Image (spheres, rainbow, N blue to C red):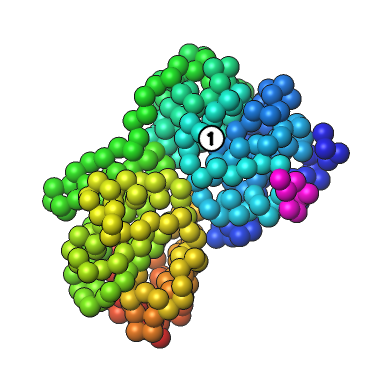
Amino acid sequence: MGGRGVLPLFAQLRREPDVDAPDLVAVDATDRLLLDEAAADLAAHPGAVVVVDDGHGALTLGAVALHGATDVRVHQDLLVGELALAANAERTGHVGSYRSVPQLDADLLRGARVVLAKAPKSRDALRELVQVVATGADPEVTLYVGGRVKHMTLGMNDVLAEGFTDVHATLARQKSRVLVARGPRPVQSSFPVCREHADLGLTVCAHGSAFAGVKVDRGTRTLLGALPGAVPDAASAVDLGCGTGVLAVALAAARPGLAVVGVDQSAAAVASAVATVAANGLADRVRVVRDDAAGSLPAGSVDLVVCNPPFHAGVAVSETLAHRLFAGAARVLRPGGELWCVYNSHLPHRDALRRIVGPTRQVTRDPTFTVTASTRS
């Protein structure tokens, strides 16, 4: 369909600007298997297709070019995935063939007959997907969830069965498998989940895909303990890669005169942080934006940046994944402003921080985590 074969289409796809893990590819065996398993449904319902967490556009553009899908609705948690899809659509001549939808909600799924999804990493993320699809899509919808066999468990079938009457797995191919769910039974959404942390004096809310969920991870706790000494006279601060918004809320609660912005490229993180901010009564003090490395914030405009950077690209470990965030912090910090960062002590981040941001000193260190403060040169 569309005059393009599978090899010419997939051969044109690129990961840019998502290049933090250069050994990963723009299309994989799971993408191909999902498209093959859903081929008949895609052909039968070309105008009622939804794609969730398409890595770099292979599922969306494959559905369009190979199976005739039109006006595909796409939700991608990561902003770099959206940008990669847009670039690949332009590269392959399919601009305008899909719509990016920022929220994983009923509006995304309304009228959907075919839903293609890459298997999320957590059971909570899968549960939220199941709840949204079962409740918001057409009663005749089929949900296809594909992933690498080594990352899939029998528990995923149980989660799918919470919202669907018919769940089965396809045969594996090239170490990938697809779970197929039909017969939706609407279930009440349980997200965001909120938990009070009395020891920290705050409440954390999380959607299914948010890192750490409603927990406060040990790295964040380590940085929280150091924050009272972080640029005490700061008038503005950014929580870079804010996740559920714990650091942003803690800063705003402790410093009534501080203007705080939480930034994350994950749609689930942003929705979680917004909920966390509201749960703590700080909606008038903390602004949350979906952005890649604070790219939309003015240069030289911030006194303090706090950051607990990730070091996984999907399931791959990447020591350089944080460098984009360090560069973003260096751009938005005013001269003399500081980046306070926590990271696993074994990672070689201090040299990168010196090179990218400026002079870097150790604030605290234990066998697991290190907190540093880097001054913008």
Residue 5's x, y, as percent? 82, 39
- 100 is higher (above) or lower (below) than 131: below
Residue 181's x, y, as percent? 53, 20
Residue at 61% across / 23% down in the picture? 113
SS for dot 1:
helix
Hey, which quadrant is residue 275 in on the image?
A: top left
Left-right relation of 196 to 300: left
Q: How many marks?
A: 1
Q: What amino acid is at disc 1?
A: Leu
Q: Is residue 268 magenta?
A: no
The residue lying furthest to the left in this view is 199
Q: Can residue 267 be seen at all in this image of the molecule?
A: yes
In the picture, which quadrant includes the C terminus? Answer: bottom left
Left-right relation of 84 to 296: right
Residue at 61% across / 37% down in the picture? 73
Residue at 35% across / 58% down in the picture? 287
Residue at 48% across / 38% down in the picture? 104
Residue 242's x, y, as percent? 36, 57
Considering depth in this image, is 223 or 67 the residue closer to the camera? 67
Residue 203's x, y, as percent? 22, 47
- 64 is higher (above) or lower (below) than 237: above
Q: Can residue 343 be seen at all in this image of the molecule?
A: no
Considering depth in this image, is 52 or 309 the residue closer to the camera? 52
Left-right relation of 343 to 41: left
Which residues lie in the magenta part?
Answer: 90-96
Considering depth in this image, is 170 or 85 the residue closer to the camera? 85
Q: Residues within 10 Å of mark 1 (few under 14, many from 20)?
A: many
- 211 is higher (above) or lower (below) than 172: below
User: To which residue does mark 1 refer?
Assistant: 108
In the picture, which quadrant includes the N terminus? Answer: top right
Left-right relation of 107 to 114: left
